[in-house]
Amino acid sequence: MDAYAVLETGGKQYRVTTGMRLEIERLAAEVGTDVELSTVLAVSDGNEIKIGMPYVDGAKVVLTIDGQIRGKKVINFKKKRRKGYSRTVGHRQELTAATVKSIVA
């Protein structure tokens, strides 16, 4: 089994492996730089798993920033029938595209 880590960022949790590309909530970092995230909830080397309470001590995930992108547009539409009320709100989430460079247990 491959090594993996469970990472928390942007209020969400991601199971990542080395070389994996993911889109996470916007990080304030330049394109091409490396970012170390130490909010690792669990880490496995393929044989043994370490689970943190809440985070694993000394564990970190190094990400390489590939770009800053915007997510898919989400439309929220509200309507009350026979009242002449309708409301439309759109939202596009700011995302960061990153590649997992390494997992340090």
Image (cartoon, rainbow, N blue to C red):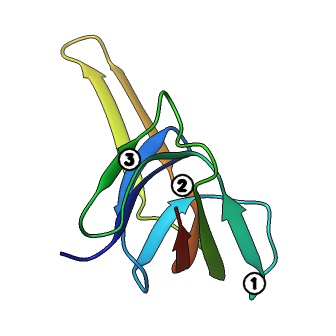
Q: Residues within 10 Å of mark 3 (few under 14, many from 20)?
A: some
- Label 1's element? loop
Distance between mark 3 and mark 1 Cα atoms: 31 Å
Q: For mark 3, what is the residue?
A: 50
**Distance (Cα) linking label 1 and label 2:** 18 Å
Residue under label 1, please give it: 31
Q: In which quadrant is the N terminus drawn? A: bottom left
Looking at the image, is 105 positioned above or below residue 55? below
The amino acid at mark 1 is: Val
Which badge, 1 or 2, comes first in the chain's sequence? 1
Residue 46 in which image quadrant:
bottom left
Element carrying mark 2: loop
Q: Nearer the viewer, residue 86 or 48?
A: 48
Q: Nearer the viewer, mark 2 or mark 3?
A: 3
Foreground mark, 1 or 2, reads 1
Residue 2 shown left or right of residue 100 in the figure = left
> Would residue 62 be found to the left or right of residue 93 on screen?
right
Q: Upstream in the sequence, badge 3 or badge 1?
A: 1
The residue indicated by pointer 2 is: 93
Q: Residue 50 in the image: x percent, y percent?
A: 38, 47
Dot 1 surroundings within 10 Å: few (below 14), some, or many (20 or more)?
some
Outermost residue toward the front? 48
Depth check: give the residue in front, 96 or 47: 47
Callout 1 touching callout 2 (CB < 8 Å): no
> Where residue 61 sits in the image (x, y, percent)?
57, 65
Q: Position of residue 64 (x, y in %)?
A: 64, 81
Q: Residue at x 43, y 86 (%)?
A: 19
Q: Which amino acid type is shown beneath numbered disc 3?
A: Lys
Q: Are marks 2 and 3 in contact (CB under 8 Å)?
A: no
Residue at 40% in and 60% down: 5
Tell me which numbered mark, 2 or 3, is placed earlier along the sequence.
3
Q: Percent position (x, y) of residue 3?
A: 33, 72
